[in-house]
Amino acid sequence: MALRTFVRTAHAGSFSRAARDLGLSQPSISRILARLETEVGAKLLVRTTRAVALSEAGADYLARIEPLVSALEEADHAARGTGELRGLLRIALSSSFGVREVIPRLPKFLERHPALRIDLGINDQRQDLVVEGVDVALRLGSLPDSSAVARKLAEAPRVLAASPAYLERRGRPRNPEDFASHAMIIGPGPNAWTFTKNGQRISVRVEGQLTTAANEGAVAGAVAGLGITLTSFWGCRAEIERGDLIRIMEDWAMDPVEVHALFPPGRAASPAARAFIDYLAPQL
């Protein structure tokens, strides 16, 4: 218990957040860690009025014991022999993908594992898996060089879409050169778009009348009739199914969007993280 408490506190950066994660009181966390420091014979944490940070000895201790804590969790899971998952599963993911594709699939997973709690770190900025104490991250698009362990889960086509009202007013583009006479909405990602048709590969730089760093903003702009946007099919599935958006230029192929599960480096994936990804992957 003390080692798990230390690992969670080190990643949480505060007693209060660790207490919430572990279902304990803040004084209990403080007492457990004080006893651990006494047993180890070294100061592992530096306490301030606002946060908790690792001492030099604490950072070294964390690196050494974290694989052991993961192994203990694995052993506990195997010993139960029921497949039951317990504790806290911390997942990092982007807002649009989380709200549209992950949260609607959580009820059945949690019904199977009622003793498990999930902390969704929804953030469009990529979190540091180790610093944030993330058990698994879901990342769309290309992966940067990383020591994290990655597993490809699925891929979806990139979609060019516009509202019926916009297309009735401005007409449909037939090829990338037609973008110059259309209102374009630039969402997350680069504004250089590459298309392939009949072996011909064309890259065009798109200037947007509306630019936004959030997929939800770009899709909402397209639904409002402000122009044409590019997103993954995951990012506009609901609007296309409702008829709020219409796919265009489907005969021009684009590289698909991949989604990967990333596990923190230096330790085995937790049983809960593996079970969640095994559950999610077939549905995507």
Image (cartoon, grey):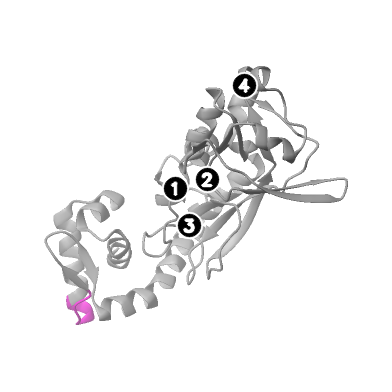
Please tell me which of labels 3 and 1 falls first in the chain. Answer: 3
Residue at the image point whose x is 38% and y is 78% from the top? 64
The residue to which callout 3 is attached is: 77
In space, the residues marked 4 and 2 are separated at their CA atoms by 21 Å
The quarter of the displayed image where residue 184 is located: top right
Label 2: which secondary element = loop
Which one is in front in this view, the residue at disc 3 or the one at disc 2?
2
Labelled disc at residue 124: 1
Contact? badges 2 and 1 (CB < 8 Å): yes
Residue type for callout 1 = Asp
**Which residue is found at the position 59% from the left and 44% from the top?**
280
- The numbered disc on residue 166 is 4
Return the residue nearer the eye: 76 or 202: 202
Name the residue type under label 4: Tyr
The relative height of residue 190 versus residue 98 in the rendered view (above or below) is below
Between marks 2 and 1, how big is the CA–CA gap? 10 Å
In magenta stretch: residue 63:
no
Number of numbered tags placed on the structure image:
4
Q: Quadrant of the N terminus?
A: bottom left
The disc placed on residue 188 is: 2
Magenta residues, start to end: 38-44
**In the shown orientation, is residue 271 left or right of residue 10?**
right
